[in-house]
Image (spheres, rainbow, N blue to C red):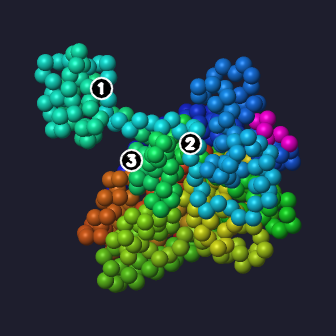
């Protein structure tokens, strides 16, 4: 099996749900989300939202995040626009108050197709000079950095090495050969994290996202140290649905089982208390995905002439194949995702309901927009802040009974190898013996090259691809330590014995 491991470290917070936090931009985003949800729940959002930037950065506040308190307040306003569902590029007059955007949001008839927007005022326009000589340079006689540079990009002045950016091709030979480690690599974090080159600078040096290239993996959202990449929320539409006469039904992704230190039954019960009329596990649709994908694998690969087949339930990978790897598309399973099948089931049961998918990543928000049966998407991060803001005790016994018809393996889809295990379990013993599995555990530039190579020669015949390392438990919108979440999900997937 092919794995791609990169350890991730988290530090604890005071949040009662122990939300995983890796940087201060997450703390700011979640505080702002919580404040907005509190006002939405209390029915005071329009009246009080313009005070939020001033309350979070009051007069005399000393620990500003940017150059001054006024810049902090401006950025908080733009981030609030994203939570209200607006792209920063939609601003026509910077004097327009947030209250006006609230009114527009409640009058809005359609949600945005593109879930990401870049706050240009927050973007620091990181200079794209990847290799830099630090003051640790000793100006040594050997000068291996200069000798090993084939482009003549390094020269010495006043006993120090200097890199000419007009000649440098970022090969890294200078850094590799410096005996004092005086040359360092400085990336542009958002561009460096994007596996498909979808984010780049415009003519003003600010980053922008090309929707034609973007696979909505959310790497830039997590990587930007200035929090300049913002996800547009559907919170306003959700609360509009709560206030309407139509039922509001939650479709909850299997990864939710690892997000809180309590039982899945309690989690589902707590979600219902937020205002949902019903909560349906997306693992129910995963049962259909498993059956269909197992039948497709048997027909096309095990009993047919196709060399291999890849999974199709990760929307980031699905978009990657169709936008960037046309040679792989014929090998991608035609089976739809668990969300798709669950939404079909829910729509038959609730024809007039607002169906809200609750999931771990930006890519699922994009998929939800394209799904004819899904109306809105709520991220795990938004779910966590709603539980906090609305005072729902997720640890209280909800006395909710889980759907006993759902296969345990379907609840394990959220962890890497979960789909592979479920599909293998749906095959006969003879068919299982024929499987040569490959697991792509996270999409990056290296694994993209690897997958491309499978079109010519694949060492396996079934390939599971997850965009996030570890699977959906490590999506860009999760709120729990992925290691803990993985353990909880896998334990749940073992609770129900299955036979074939």
Q: Which residue matches tag 3?
A: 5
Going from N to C along the chain, the mark reached first, 2 or 1, is 2
Image coords of residue 461 (percent x, y): 33, 71
Q: Is residue 478 visible?
A: no
For label 3, the SS is: loop
Looking at the image, is 194 positioned above or below residue 321?
Answer: above
Relative to 171, say whether 58 is above or below: above
| Of labels 2 and 1, the one closer to you | 2
The quarter of the picture where residue 60 lies is top right
Earlier-in-chain disc, 3 versus 1: 3
Q: Is residue 312 left or right of residue 47?
A: left
Q: Nearer the viewer, residue 312 or 67?
A: 67
Reading the chain from its start, which is encountered first: label 2 or label 3?
A: 3
Residue at mark 2: 120
Which image quadrant: the N terminus? bottom left
Instruction: Say which residue appears at 43% left-offset and 69% top-offset.
Output: 322
- Residue placed at 85% from the left, 63% from the top? 244
The residue stretch that appears in magenta: 47-52
Q: What secondary structure prevails in the magenta region?
A: helix
Q: Are marks 2 and 3 in contact (CB under 8 Å)?
A: no
Answer whether labels 2 and 1 touch (C-beta < 8 Å). Answer: no
Q: CA distance from mark 2 to mark 3?
A: 33 Å
Mark 2, secondary structure of its residue = loop
Neighbour tally class for label 3: few under 14, some 14-19, many 20 plus, Cα within 10 Å? few
Specify whether residue 260 is in view. Answer: yes
Q: Residue at x 51, y 35 (%)?
A: 124
Disc 3 to disc 1, C-alpha distance:
30 Å
């Amino acid at each position: 099996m092919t794995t791609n491991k990169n350890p991730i470290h988290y530090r604890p917070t005071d949040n009662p749900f122990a939300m995983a936090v890796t940087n201060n931009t997450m703390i700011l985003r979640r505080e702002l989300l919580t404040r907005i949800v509190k006002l939405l729940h209390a029915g005071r959002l329009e009246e009080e939202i313009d005070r939020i930037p001033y309350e979070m950065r009051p007069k005399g506040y000393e620990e500003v995040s940017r150059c001054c308190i006024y810049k902090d307040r401006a950025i908080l306003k733009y981030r609030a626009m994203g939570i209200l569902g607006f792209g920063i590029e939609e601003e026509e007059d910077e004097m327009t108050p947030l209250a006006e955007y609230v009114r527009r949001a409640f009058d809005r008839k359609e949600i945005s197709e593109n879930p990401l927007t870049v706050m240009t005022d927050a973007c620091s326009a990181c200079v794209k000079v990847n290799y830099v000589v630090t003051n640790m340079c000793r100006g040594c006689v050997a000068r291996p950095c200069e000798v090993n540079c084939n482009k003549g990009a390094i020269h010495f002045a006043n006993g120090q090495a200097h890199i000419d950016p007009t000649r440098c091709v970022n090969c890294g030979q200078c850094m590799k050969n410096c005996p004092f480690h005086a040359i360092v690599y400085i990336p542009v974090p958002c561009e460096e994290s994007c596996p498909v080159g979808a984010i780049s600078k415009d003519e003003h040096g600010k980053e922008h996202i090309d929707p034609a290239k973007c696979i909505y993996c959310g790497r830039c959202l997590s990587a930007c140290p200035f929090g300049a990449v913002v996800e547009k929320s559907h919170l306003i539409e959700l609360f509009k649905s709560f206030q309407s006469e139509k039922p509001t039904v939650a479709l909850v992704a299997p990864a939710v089982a690892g997000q809180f230190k309590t039982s899945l039954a309690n989690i589902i019960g707590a979600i219902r208390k937020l205002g949902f009329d019903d909560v349906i596990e997306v693992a129910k649709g995963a049962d259909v995905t498993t059956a269909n994908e197992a039948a497709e694998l048997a027909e096309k690969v095990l009993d047919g002439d196709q060399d291999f087949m890849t999974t199709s339930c990760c929307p980031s990978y699905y978009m990657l194949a169709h936008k960037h790897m046309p040679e792989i598309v014929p090998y991608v399973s035609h089976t739809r995702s668990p969300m798709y099948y669950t939404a079909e089931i829910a729509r038959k049961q609730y024809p007039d309901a607002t169906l809200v998918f609750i999931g771990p990543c930006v890519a699922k928000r994009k998929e939800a927009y394209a799904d004819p049966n899904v109306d809105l998407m709520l991220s795990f991060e938004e779910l966590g802040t709603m539980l906090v803001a609305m005072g729902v005790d997720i640890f209280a016994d909800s006395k909710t009974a889980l759907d006993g018809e759902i296969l345990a393996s379907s609840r394990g889809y959220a962890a890497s190898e979960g789909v592979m295990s479920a599909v293998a379990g749906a095959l006969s013993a003879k068919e299982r013996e024929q499987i040569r599995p490959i697991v792509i555990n996270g999409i990056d530039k290296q694994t993209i090259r690897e997958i491309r190579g499978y079109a010519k020669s694949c060492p396996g015949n079934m390939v599971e691809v997850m965009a996030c390392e570890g699977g959906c438990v490590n999506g860009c919108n999760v709120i729990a330590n992925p290691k803990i979440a993985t353990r909880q999900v896998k334990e749940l997937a073992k609770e129900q014995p299955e036979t074939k």
